[in-house]
Amino acid sequence: MALCWLTTLCAQEFGSHWIRIPQPDSLSHVWFRQTYVEDGLPLEARVTVASPGYYKLYVNECNVGTALFYPPRLQADSQPVAMTFDVTPFLRADTNVVALCYAPSYPHVDSSQVSVQFFGVDASGAPFSRFSDGGWLCRRANSRWTVDGKEYVDGRLHDASWKAAWFNPALWLTADELTADELTAADGAKVTYLSATHPVLRHVHTDGYRYFDRDGCGVSYEFGVGFHGMVRLTLREARRGERISYDGLEYVCNGQLDEQAYPVFRMADYRRVRVTGDRRFKRDQITVVEAIQTAYEPDGDGLPW
């Protein structure tokens, strides 16, 4: 009952705690994070996120929810959407890190990028509520949209610690907290709330390719059936800085053993995919080709607040 009361109270304030990276643009993906110090393990907690773009939510490095990303929206739709998630299973007694990987709804420049609430019942049984503000940190991620609507991922700049308790703050910026005047003019003034029963894009099946064809500049993989989702490549002996491209993804290799190339947010329809690369690219570097098939299904981890 206490959490339901707190949820109602938080909803009255929601939409007034928007943050963004300084100098936002329509292409950059952004990492946001905040570390909350606890006095014991919270009894339960929720996170509500509103955004006019896309995001992946993490608590203590755990991917929250069952969707590939949130929220479900049509391409180029920038209506702010809010969803609430139960994060109780991911909580810790010392600190709790709430982190998001955000992407704008290209081609829009989202003046208000995310609004986050972390609320629940603490170890003593008292309710708590924390909002995104200027204390949050942010930095541009290793992925972004391209001007022609594709996705660019630089594997050399991947930093797994961006959502961890221990990280290097040197490259991080203080998030801009929007003022009341900015919110009045911002696109994020009105928020649509989605319930747990609303379908989200989930991974439903993984399959391999049927056969491949070589050509002078690359290799094509045939899956035999059409599907919506993404293609994931596992690479071995790729050189650091080597560039590989396929159907909407431009990937820069980090040179590590069995690195994987795949989009962060871009989904598409596939039946056949052609992979090309720079002069260092060899077909034998591709050890696994996976068809990640998706479908819209209800999200079991969302909450109908």
Image: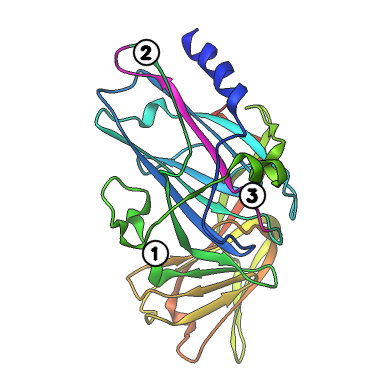
Which quadrant of the structure image shows residue 245? bottom right
Nearest to N terminus: mark 1 or mark 2: 2
- Which residue is the extreme one toward the top? 1
Q: Is residue 121 above or below residue 133?
A: above
The 10 Å Cα crowd at callout 3, few under 14, some 14 to 19, many 20 or more, is many
* Marks 3,2: beta carbons within 8 A: no
Q: What stretch is highlighted in magenta?
A: 109-124
Mark-to-mark CA distance, 3 and 2: 33 Å
Q: Is residue 103 magenta?
A: no
- Give amino acid for label 3: Gly
Instruction: Kindly identify which residue carries mark 1.
Output: 158
Q: Which residue is drawn at 63% across and 55% down?
A: 104
Q: In this view, does 271 lie above or below 196?
A: below
The 10 Å Cα crowd at callout 1, few under 14, some 14 to 19, many 20 or more, is few
Residue 52 in picture, x, y percent from top left: 66, 46
Frontmost of labels 1 and 2 is 2
- Give amino acid for label 1: His
Residue 5 in picture, x, y percent from top left: 53, 11
Residue 61 in picture, x, y percent from top left: 36, 44
Residue closer to the observer: 6 or 210: 6
Which quadrant of the structure image shows residue 159? bottom left
Left or right position of 106 against 63: right
Q: In this view, does 175 lie above or below 283?
A: above
Mark-to-mark CA distance, 1 and 2: 39 Å
Which quadrant of the structure image shows residue 130? top left
Instruction: Kindly identify which residue carries mark 2.
Output: 126
Nearest to N terminus: mark 3 or mark 2: 3
